Image (cartoon, helix red, strand yellow):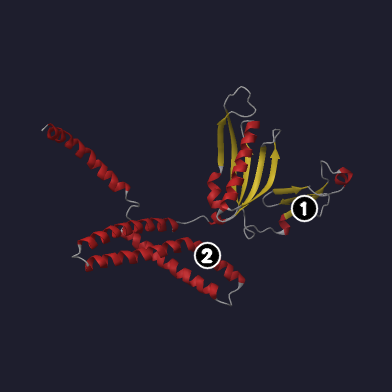
């Protein structure tokens, strides 16, 4: 009797807790929100155009009389469409599965076990359809053309003195390791070291698939709080470095006319002996319309510079 009384007291509390849990479970198991029928219809029209364009490009690539330029252009566009085409193929296959399950439920309307099994699989297929619709919607959004380019990485030490230069070195080496892990090519362009062998400035050229698109949001100020090796009393210091990610320009992006360039030669400074200081081996080129200047004096020969 006591046990029944105890159960009667806790049942309302259990019911109060179980209801929100059921609601929470119904939301957490839903992978993606349902898109509106109008949006799905518009998206289907776009997907049909992508399928037609992909088939056209495939035919162009298979043409034996296609020029190298046409082949390269078509192959590049196909690579852009490949992610969307993979999702489209998955969506088409999933739609066939949904149609098949619904037909099975109609044919086996008297078999309860078969109906339950098909209904369970149908729910999973509909969730997958929602996920594919959401992924396709993201893939159809306009993309930055520069995302596919290689990039230039520039790291500069900021506030923090020697500790900032050591932090800049850590950041630069981190991007080096990350690039190798991603299978990208990491080429050091220039490094200016500090007294403790940290990096005051460092730059590198990174090349690979969609490098700029994956690294462009790394640009900005990076800060660290730690006890530096230069600190003997154990105090925590705050240091900062700046990171710049710049897309590499294609050869066709910049057109330089000879009449827009002013080329000056002069005697180079620094080490190199009498020959470097008595001949006009250094070269400076100025782009007159923009005022941009590039100078080099690395070699002893003007032609090599």
Whole-percent x, y for residue 56 in the image: 49, 72
User: Is disc 1 surrounded by few (<14), some (14 to 19) or many (20+) residues within 10 Å?
Assistant: few
Mark 1 vs mark 2, foreground winner is 2
Q: State the image coordinates of residue 23 (x, y, percent, origin top left).
A: 26, 45
Number of numbered discs: 2
Disc number for residue 263: 1
- Measure the alpha-carbon separation of dots 1 and 2: 40 Å
Badge 2 density bin: few <14, some 14–19, many ≥20, Cα 10 Å: some
Which residue shows up at 53% across the image and 46% down it?
217
Q: Is residue 122 above or below residue 22?
A: below
Tell me if residue 91 comes above or below residue 155 in the rendering.
below
Residue shown at the point (62%, 42%) measured from the top left: 173
Residue wearing tag 2: 77
Q: Which residue ends up furthest to the bottom in the rendered image?
A: 65
Residue 199 percent coordinates (x, y):
67, 38
* Label 1 secondary element: strand
Q: Residue at x 85, y 46 (%)?
A: 276
Q: Which of the marked residues, 1 or 2, is nearer the chain's N terminus?
A: 2
Question: Of all residues shown, which one is farthest toward the left?
Answer: 1
Foreground residue among 7 and 223: 7
Residue 81: image tag: none
Residue pictured at 20% horizontal, 35% vertical: 13
Of the 4 image quadrants, the one containing the N terminus is top left
Label 2 secondary element: helix
- Residue placed most toward the observer, 6 or 288: 6
């Amino acid at each position: 009797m006591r046990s029944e009384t105890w159960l009667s007291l806790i049942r309302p509390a259990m019911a109060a807790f179980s209801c929100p849990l059921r609601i929470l479970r119904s939301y957490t198991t839903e992978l993606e929100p349902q898109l509106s029928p109008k949006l799905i219809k518009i998206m289907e029209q776009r997907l049909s155009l992508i399928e037609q364009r992909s088939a056209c490009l495939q035919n162009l690539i298979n043409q034996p009389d296609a020029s190298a330029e046409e082949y390269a252009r078509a192959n590049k566009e196909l690579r852009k469409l490949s992610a969307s085409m993979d999702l489209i193929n998955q969506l088409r296959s999933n739609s066939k599965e949904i149609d098949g399950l619904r037909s099975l439920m109609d044919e086996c309307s008297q078999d309860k076990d078969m109906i339950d099994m098909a209904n369970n699989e149908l729910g999973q297929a509909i969730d997958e359809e929602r996920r594919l619709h959401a992924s396709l919607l993201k893939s159809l959004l306009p993309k930055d053309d520069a995302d596919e380019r290689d990039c230039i990485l520039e790291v500069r030490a900021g506030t923090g003195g020697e500790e900032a230069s050591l932090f800049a070195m850590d950041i630069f080496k981190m991007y080096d390791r990350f690039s190798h892990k991603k299978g990208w090519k990491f080429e050091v362009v220039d490094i200016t070291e500090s007294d403790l062998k940290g990096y005051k400035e460092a730059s590198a050229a990174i090349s690979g698939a969609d490098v700029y698109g994956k690294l462009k949001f790394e640009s900005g100020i990076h800060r660290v709080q730690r006890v530096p090796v230069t600190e003997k009393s154990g105090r925590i210091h705050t240091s900062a470095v700046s990171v710049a990610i710049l897309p590499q320009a294609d050869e066709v992006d910049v057109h330089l006319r000879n009449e827009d360039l002013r080329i000056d030669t002069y005697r180079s400074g620094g080490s190199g002996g009498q020959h470097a200081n008595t001949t006009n081996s250094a070269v400076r080129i100025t782009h007159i319309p923009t005022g941009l200047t590039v100078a080099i004096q690395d070699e002893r020969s003007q032609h090599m510079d």
